Image: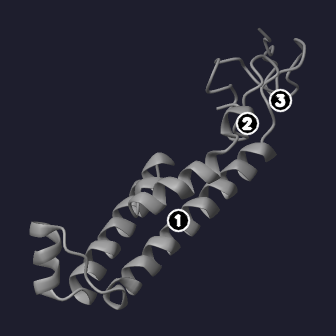
Amino acid sequence: MNLNSLKGRPLVAALLATLVAGLGHLYLKKWARTVAWFTLIYVAGLVFVPRPELIALVNQGAEPPVAHLLPVLAIQFLSALDAYRVARTERRRLAALDPCPNCGKPTDDDLEFCPWCTQRLGVESPEQDGASGNRLISR
């Protein structure tokens, strides 16, 4: 994933999380956080909004008092804030990676090749490997 393709990603994640808790994390492919935030908002709705008002909300669309919704709205806000923070952290992590000399996308230091274009990384010109006598091949 090229860093240029990540522009606006933290904001998009936060906006999605304001619509539905966990949706921003789903966009970021953070599966455990998605389930955690969705479960937390669901449980908060069951705990803090009285049952008759929940039934009226589901069946008739009647809005419960704002005081009952404050904990749910606070969790919604924290979900959006967390989605923004996670996306921003991921973006910074990707920016710190060395780009592939062939395709320019971020590479992982643990890999000997680019996961995007399969270009072999870190190989200089052909020379003798002193320990084993094997020749290193660059492509």
Q: Residues within 10 Å of mark 1 (few under 14, many from 20)?
A: many
Left/right of residue 61 with respect to residue 77 in the rendered view: left
Q: Residues within 10 Å of mark 3 (few under 14, many from 20)?
A: few
Instruction: Describe the element under mark 1 as helix, strand or loop.
Output: helix
Q: For the point 25% across and 76% down, which residue is it?
A: 63
Q: Could you tell me how far apart the alpha carbons at marks 2 and 3 are, in whole angstroms?
A: 38 Å
- The amino acid beneath tag 3 is Ala
- Of the residues tagged 1 and 3, which is closer to the observer? 1
Q: Quarter of the image for the C terminus: give it.
A: top right
- The amino acid beneath tag 2 is Leu
Left/right of residue 102 with respect to residue 91 in the rendered view: right
Q: Could you tell me how far apart the alpha carbons at marks 1 and 2 are, in whole angstroms?
A: 22 Å
Question: Circle 3 is placed at which residue position?
Answer: 131
Q: Residue 80: which numbered mark, if any? A: 1
Give whichever of 16, 5 is nearer the camera. Answer: 16
Q: For the point 24% across and 86% down, which residue is it?
A: 49
Q: Position of residue 113 (x, y in %)?
A: 68, 25
Left/right of residue 99 with respect to residue 118 in the rendered view: right
* Number of callouts: 3
Are the residues at dot 1 and dot 2 in contact (C-beta closer than 8 Å)? no
Give the residue furthest to the top. 139
Above or below 13: residue 126: above
Q: Position of residue 48 (x, y in %)?
A: 27, 88
Q: Residues within 10 Å of mark 2 (few under 14, many from 20)?
A: some
**Quadrant location of residue 64?**
bottom left
Question: Circle 2 is placed at which residue position?
Answer: 3
Instruction: Describe the element under mark 3 as helix, strand or loop.
Output: loop
Q: Mark 1 or 3 closer to N-term?
A: 1
- The amino acid beneath tag 1 is Ala
Above or below 113: residue 85: below
Q: Position of residue 68 (x, y in %)?
A: 31, 88
Q: For the point 19% across and 74% down, which residue is it?
A: 62
